[in-house]
Image (cartoon, helix red, strand yellow):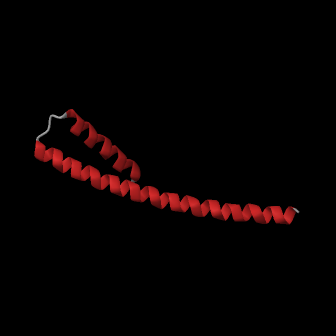
Amino acid sequence: MKFEESIKQLDEILEKLEGGKIPLDESVDLYSKGMKLCVECAEKLNEVKGKIALLEESQQGLVAKIVEVEE
């Protein structure tokens, strides 16, 4: 599932839980689903954060090489 879809589902779950008009069993199920979605989103964010760090490192290396050539 895409990150954006997970966030949308989390928003929908939150609205239902905050509404307080659903049975307790359904609330527990929604809470459990919401927690799973939170974990998935956190993992995806960590994955993207790692990719960005790698890109920044490679760009810094290229910039350093360009500066060396110009000097």
Q: Picture quarter containing residue 61?
A: bottom right
Residue depicted at 21% across the width and 47% down the height = 30
Q: In x, y percent, where is residue 47?
A: 46, 61
Residue 22 placement (x, y as % from top left): 14, 38
For residue 53, what is the image quadrant?
bottom right
In the rendered structure, the answer to whether residue 52 lies left or right of residue 21 reads right
Q: Position of residue 20 (x, y in %)?
A: 17, 35
Lateral position of residue 51 relative to residue 9, left or right: right
Q: Residue at x 38, y 54 (%)?
A: 41
Name the residue: 81% across, 61% down.
Answer: 67
Count the labels in the image: 0
Between residues 46 and 3, which one lies in front from this camera angle? 46
Q: Is residue 34 above or below residue 67?
A: above
Q: Residue at x 14, y 46 (%)?
A: 26
Name the image quarter holding the N terminus.
Answer: bottom left
Q: Is residue 55 visible?
A: yes
Q: Is residue 58 left or right of residue 38?
A: right
